[in-house]
Amino acid sequence: MNGFIQLPWLTLLVLAPLGGALACMAWGRRAAVIAAMTEIAIALRLPLGQKPAVEAWIRFESWPWIKTYGARFSLGMDGLALLLIWLTVILMAVALGISWPRYRQGGYYALLLTSCSGTLGVFLARDLLLFYLCWEIMLLPLVLCIALWGEARRVEAGLKLLLFTLTGSLLMLFAFLTLYILHGRTTGDYTFAMQAILATPVAPELVPWLFGCLMVAFLIKVPAIPLQGWLPDAYQQAPLAVALLLAGALAKTGIFGLIRIVLPLFPDCWVGFAPFLAGIGLAGTIYGAWLAFVQDDLKRLIAYMSVAHLGFVLLGIAAGNELALQGSLLQLFSHGITISALFVLVAFVERRTTVRQLPELGGLWSRAPRLGALFLLFSLASLGLPGLNLFVGEILILMGAFLVRPWWGAVGMVGVLLAACYTLRMVQGVLWGACKGGEQPADLRHGEAALLIPLAILVLWTGLYPAPFMKLLDNPVRQIVLQLTSTGGLP
């Protein structure tokens, strides 16, 4: 239609935060605001004039990169990637906003923007080498943020996170290089292109090893039981913005990798492993819920709440039917919005009271009613209250799980009941009870409301009218179902 439409929007989306990071190092944190506004403008522009329900890729861009090794700067976006791009860009803006009153160093904002660039690259990369590079760029800046700006045990938490993720990264790199060599020897064409690699025949004796390496690499990031050892310290010691990004955006990259790489590469192994994946998901739901219930520190409580919710997502992916998959993919977006809002609220409560231990809190509803109302809204959303966003995904996952294995759905319902227990305990401890401390806390300020109101609108929109979001997921869900159907489906 015009030259404006033909701009390489995906490339700009991935590289703009890196430009913003360099600008932050040179001119300070104000450059981060410009970078965030640019990202939002590009993200909103992406779907215009496209047909996401019809085309496999809403947008696709490919540029020469490392010709010697057959690597290209290839980016592709479908409905699932678009939804996760919106989530990442929204959460990046919120992370910058929550950091603004406390952190002034340009390096801090440069690291956040660099991580954002890597996360977007993971959701868009159609080249395995590019995917791996973005995977590393996504996480290492946040490790540095924890080590440099975290709480008292920040170095220990950062090292633990680094060791877990490096283990996963090395396993992933081993699998990718093996597939690259196998494809080159088989076809004579050495390339990292995902489309070509996914069609590579793999010797039967290698399949379990490669499948296992990739499953561990991605499940560490979720994190799934029993690979969640890095989570409690990282979330508790990290700056709030980093904890928000880890739970709201980066956890989704692990599940995205399972769907986009592991399932298409090894559909037969996936079907055989599906009952175990469902068990991991259900264990995460129950275990996360129980640990959330016994926590006093609000950050740790919300961290384990996130584990419980993502266990539901794994259950839906394991179920593998259209209902469960629609619920799981929608839940990626809904969970990111809700869990991030709760982290923001923890920051606001701590600023007013200087504590975040439940026994030392109480009475917020009577002293700061607007803040209390939003805390209640997002808490009820995390509970899965009908009319709010997490309810839609949860009910679809449970329905899909009941169709495959009734006991999966029954155990999932236990997780829902436990969610009510830890959520109501949190609400009771923060909002009601005796007022502790003599000083009257300020209610929600305009700048704070500007961070939370858009998230509240998304919670209500997704809960009351999820059709536009689910339409974006129609084609990705269809593709996954076709891949599973070609193997004969779940045993």
Image: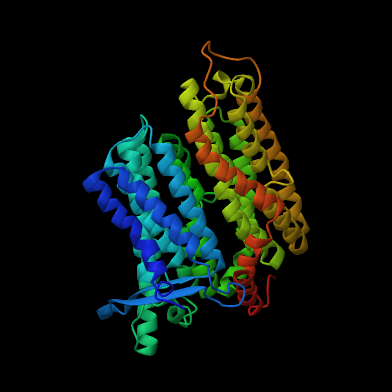
Residue 68 shown left or right of residue 293 in the figure: left
Question: Where in the figure is residue 432, as x and y percent of width and height?
Answer: 66, 22
Type of colouring: rainbow
Asked whether the viewer can see residue 338, the reply is: yes
Q: Residue furthest left?
A: 26
Of residue 214 and residue 477, the one placed in the foreground of this image is 477
Of residue 248 and residue 170, the one placed in the foreground of this image is 248
Question: Where in the figure is residue 74, as x and y percent of width and height?
Answer: 39, 74
48 is higher (above) or lower (below) than 223 = below
Residue 209 shown left or right of residue 481 in the figure: left
Residue occupying image coordinates x 43% and y 43%: 95
164 is higher (above) or lower (below) than 272 = above
394 is higher (above) or lower (below) than 68 = above
User: Residue 108's image quarter?
Assistant: top left
Of residue 245 and residue 163, the one placed in the foreground of this image is 245
420 is higher (above) or lower (below) than 311 = above
